[in-house]
Image (cartoon, rainbow, N blue to C red):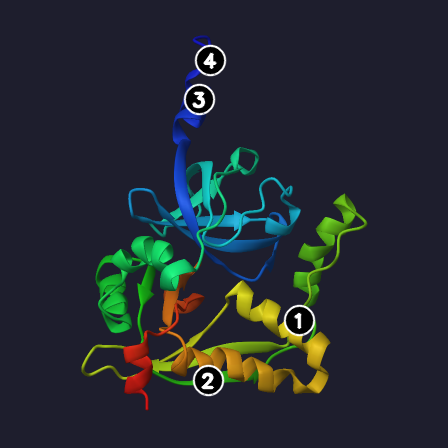
Amino acid sequence: MDSTATTSERAVFDRWETKRALIVVKTYPTPAWKGGEVVCTAAITEEGQWLRLFPIPYRLLGTESQFEKYQWIEAKVTKASSDARPESYNVDMDSIKLLQPRLTTAMNWQSRKAIVIPLLAPSMCWLREQNIANNRPTLGLVKPSVIKRLRIEPTKADWSPAEMARLNQLRLIDSTHVQLEKVPYTFFYDFDCSTPDCPGHKMSCTDWEMTQAFRSWTEKYGDGWEVQFRNRFDSEMREKFDTHFYVGTVHGNPHNWVIVGLFYPPKTAGEQLNLL
């Protein structure tokens, strides 16, 4: 760094640090005043710690920076000043580097499990209790003891005027930008966690994969999309996969938890036999 830099310039420089992390979660984009539309991304650092990268205008990133889930990246980050959640960091978008191809699903997701499973929390109830008592953690991984059902609840079919105003910022920058599609449903899971006296949880799921499946299958199957959707995200998540939930709290409501992603390696032969 230039030795003639001012104290304030040094302070700005010193806030940034380079981190390497494995991307494990991408949420569906939401309208935002800063960036037009942004996603919340969860990652695990090479030291084995949770990292929330937010906000990221993912669809505006160059192809050389558009990371996939389960891909290692390197980026300059700084603790988010407007987000009190301890895992939340802002990203220098120009610094994002894709380090290697994404981790594969070979050998029953072994390479992914080796990084993800060590962060498994005791239960969803435990995470809530810790969060209320200590304001942390605000990210976690839980394994439901029982997934009771998937709920599909209709919501508004169109963006609100305020949301449209945010999205329209992008059209001013790039008239060819494809407007973000409004998904007219909210998806929820009802489940019990492993706490013996768990009262049950109903949590919305904002995973990009789930929402993209809805968009793709409504185009492919028309009115029959829900059959395909429930087969994948309800029946198979309960019967075929060893389903875990990535969970996180909401910015502005740090005690409200949602499911931000799904981790679903296939069940072993023994686990499948137990269902029979």
Where is mark 1, residue-wise?
216
Q: Is residue 194 left or right of residue 22?
A: left
Residue at the image position 54 percent from the left and 66 percent from the top: 209
- Quadrant of residue 144 within the rendered picture: bottom left
Q: Are marks 2 and 3 in contact (CB under 8 Å)?
A: no
Give the CA separation, mark 1 to mark 3. 49 Å
Residue at the image position 67 percent from the left and 55 percent from the top: 166
Closest to the observer, 249 or 110 = 110
Amino acid residing under circle 4: Ala
Q: Is residue 135 left or right of residue 179?
A: left
Amino acid residing under circle 2: Ser
Q: Which mark is residue 8?
A: 3
Amino acid residing under circle 3: Ser
Q: Which mark is residue 235?
A: 2
From where the camera sits, is residue 136 visible? no
* Mark 3 neighbour class, 10 Å CA radius: few under 14, some 14 to 19, many 20 or more: few
Q: Is residue 26 above or below residue 101?
A: below
Give the CA separation, mark 4 to mark 1. 52 Å
Q: Are marks 4 and 1 in contact (CB under 8 Å)?
A: no
Q: Are marks 2 and 1 in contact (CB under 8 Å)?
A: no
- The earlier-in-sequence mark between 4 and 1 is 4
- The earlier-in-sequence mark between 2 and 1 is 1
